[in-house]
């Protein structure tokens, strides 16, 4: 689950673990494409506890399904391990403008999700990245894990804070 941000930062990744003994990190990127997270020099890391560290990206490259990065001030494995699980946030002002029909995940958290039949499924609680692709977790009377794809996410009404999804209200 990602933390809710105050609006000036968006969560675009999560630190997985240390890589090697010299302070390198492995990071899961939520950006599209994933390596575009490396385009930003200023990273804000946020722990589940709310603690925040602002660090400069020195180097980085794709490494399998993750990114391998070196941040300023992390010089050994212990320092890197201390950041495992922290969220990578980028200032909204540093991000490119969105194209028509594009949305940032953080902006959709809290939106009401309604299926094509008009049944309210609940509210978007968070997004999860699974091997088969990202899903939005909608919590209501039941919990629904809805794939984030054009097939399933049919309409976003930002003014009404409502999503229309192709997803049954009852799924066995």
Image: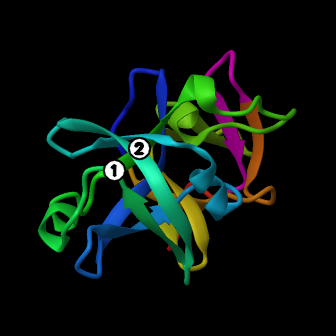
Colour mapping: rainbow
Location of residue 99 with respect to 33 vertically, above or below: above
Q: CA distance from mark 2 to mark 1?
A: 5 Å
Question: Is 121 positioned to the left or the right of 147 in the image?
Answer: left
Disc nearer the start of the sequence (2/1): 2
Question: What is the quadrant of residue 46 in the picture?
Answer: top left
Q: Residue at x 62, y 38 (%)?
A: 104
**Contact, mark 2 vs mark 1 (Cβ under 8 Å):** yes
Q: Which residues are magenta?
A: 157-167
Element type at mark 1 = loop
95 drawn magenta: no
- Tell me, yes or no, if residue 1 can be seen here: no
Q: Is residue 21 left or right of residue 138?
A: left
Residue 7 drawn at (x, y percent) = 47, 21
Residue under circle 2?
56
Q: Position of residue 124 (x, y in %)?
A: 49, 41
Q: Height in image: 34 above or below 164?
A: below
Where does residue 63 sit, x and y in percent of width and height? 53, 80
Residue drawn where x is 69% and y is 56% of the image: 32
Residue for badge 1: 72
Residue 80 seen in the current view: yes
What residue lies at 73% left-to-right and 59% top-to-bottom?
Answer: 149
**The stretch drawn in magenta includes residue 159:** yes
The circle drawn on residue 10 is: none
Quick one: SS at disc 2? strand
Which residue is at 33% across, 50% downward?
72
Q: Residues within 10 Å of mark 1 (few under 14, many from 20)?
A: some
Q: Nearer the viewer, residue 53 or 47?
A: 53
User: Is 147 located above or below residue 54 in the figure?
Assistant: below
Residue 87 drawn at (x, y percent): 35, 49
């Amino acid at each position: 689950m990602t933390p809710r941000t105050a609006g000036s930062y968006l969560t675009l990744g999560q630190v997985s673990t240390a890589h090697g003994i010299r302070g390198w990190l492995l990071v899961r990127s939520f950006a599209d494409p994933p390596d575009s997270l490396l385009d930003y020099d200023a990273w804000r890391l946020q722990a589940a506890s709310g603690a925040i560290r602002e660090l400069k990206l020195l180097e980085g490259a794709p490494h399998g399904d993750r990114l391998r990065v070196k941040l300023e001030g992390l010089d050994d494995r212990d320092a890197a391990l201390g950041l495992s699980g922290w969220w990578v946030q980028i200032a909204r002002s540093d991000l490119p403008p969105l194209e028509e029909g594009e949305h940032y995940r953080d902006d959709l958290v809290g939106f009401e999700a309604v299926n094509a039949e008009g049944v309210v499924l609940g509210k978007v609680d968070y997004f999860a990245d699974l091997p088969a692709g990202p899903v939005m977790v909608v919590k209501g009377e039941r919990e629904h894990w809805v794939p984030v794809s054009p097939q399933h996410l049919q309409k976003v009404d930002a003014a009404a804070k409502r999503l229309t999804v192709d997803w049954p209200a009852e799924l066995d």
